[in-house]
């Protein structure tokens, strides 16, 4: 009997709704840049993936607890996360912006004085909002997912929300009534997070797979499938 090495399956946690990176399409199938990208990397590198839509904060906590093998969820590469996880090379550029309800009187961060800003648990954007809330004099309210956070603004409960520019732009393009009121802050890239123990193992494959996809045009295909021109 020949010994056949079983293809290893890795479980990746992702967000519940973070279009264009992960979202349920009209057939209720999870699609998006992150989903396609991790599957394409796995194909290039000969491993299998299972994607679990856990929500951003839960995904990161599950990774910390060793319950999943990785996180791909529009996750910014930050110094804090690099200290905790093995982070892949950047696969998409991003930056943090504030957005108010379209047509509202909120036009800039100064207009937020005395107002409430919706933030999302465990995100770099939430940390950023908390770091400037005294300067601009706003309070915060927390949500676990971006949809509910946006809704709190469009229904007029909060004056603004804070999230990543490509995600807010996608929401606006798909009919969410928001307008951006700040310049992108903390610009950087999204990375795939793995346990530190994978630094010289799975991380190497993921970075190599990503390079192959950039070289063979598949990366561009995935991006343009969801955002057209890649911006
Ligand atoms: N990019 C943000 C972060 O890394 C939020 C990610 C998300 O909400 N899925 O914190």
Image: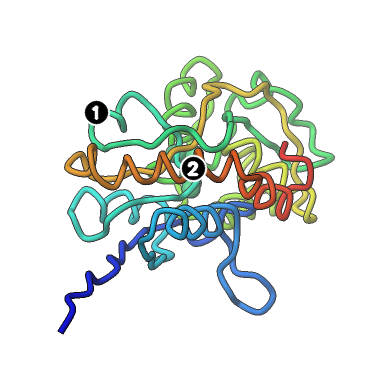
Q: CA distance from mark 1 to mark 2?
A: 22 Å
On the rendered structure, is 87 left or right of 85? Answer: right
On the rendered structure, is 104 left or right of 11? Answer: right
On the rendered structure, is 117 left or right of 108? Answer: left
Toward the viewer: 33 or 118? 33
Determine the secondary structure under disc 2. Answer: helix
Checking the image for residue 212, the label placed there is none
Within 8 Å: ligand 1 and the Cβ of disc 2? no
Determine which residue is flagged by label 1.
83
Determine which residue is flagged by label 2.
210
Residue extending farthest right:
103
Q: Are there few (<14), some (14-19), or many (20+) residues within 10 Å of tag 2? A: many
On the rendered structure, is 170 left or right of 115? Answer: right
N-terminal of the two: label 1 or label 2?
1
Within the image, what quadrant is residue 3 found in? bottom left
Q: Position of residue 90 (x, y in %)?
A: 48, 33
Q: Are there few (<14), some (14-19), or many (20+) residues within 10 Å of tag 1? A: few
Toward the viewer: 38 or 175? 38
Within 8 Å: ligand 1 and the Cβ of disc 1? no
Q: Position of residue 135 (x, y in %)?
A: 50, 15
Q: Is residue 15 above or below residue 86?
A: below
Q: Quadrant of the C terminus?
A: top right
Toward the viewer: 204 or 126? 204
Identify the residue at image location x=49%, y=37%.
190
Q: Position of residue 48 (x, y in %)?
A: 37, 65
Q: Quadrant of the N terminus?
A: bottom left
Residue extending farthest front:
1
Q: Of tags 1 and 2, which is closer to the observer?
A: 2
Identify the residue at image location x=43%, y=65%.
53
Q: How is the image coloured?
A: rainbow
């Amino acid at each position: 009997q020949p010994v056949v090495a079983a293809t290893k399956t890795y479980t990746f946690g992702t967000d519940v709704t973070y279009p264009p990176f992960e979202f349920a399409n009209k057939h209720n199938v999870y699609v998006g840049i992150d989903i396609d990208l991790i599957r394409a990397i796995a194909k290039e590198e000969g491993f299998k993936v299972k994607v679990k839509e856990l929500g951003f904060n839960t995904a990161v906590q599950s990774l910390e607890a060793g319950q999943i093998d990785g996180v791909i969820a529009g996750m910014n590469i930050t110094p804090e996360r690099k200290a905790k996880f093995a982070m892949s090379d950047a696969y998409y550029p991003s930056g943090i912006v504030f957005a108010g309800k379209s047509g509202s009187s909120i036009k800039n961060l100064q207009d937020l004085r005395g107002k409430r800003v919706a933030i999302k648990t465990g995100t770099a954007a939430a940390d950023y909002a908390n770091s400037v809330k005294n300067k601009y004099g706003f309070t915060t309210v927390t949500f676990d997912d971006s949809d509910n956070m946006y809704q709190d603004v469009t229904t007029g409960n909060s004056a603004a929300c804070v999230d990543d520019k490509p995600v807010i732009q996608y929401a606006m393009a798909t009919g969410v009534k928001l307008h951006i009121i700040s310049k992108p802050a903390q610009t950087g890239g999204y990375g795939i997070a793995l346990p530190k123990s994978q630094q010289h193992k799975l991380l190497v494959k993921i970075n190599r797979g990503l390079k192959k996809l950039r070289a063979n045009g598949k990366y561009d295909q995935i991006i343009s499938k969801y955002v057209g021109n890649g911006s």
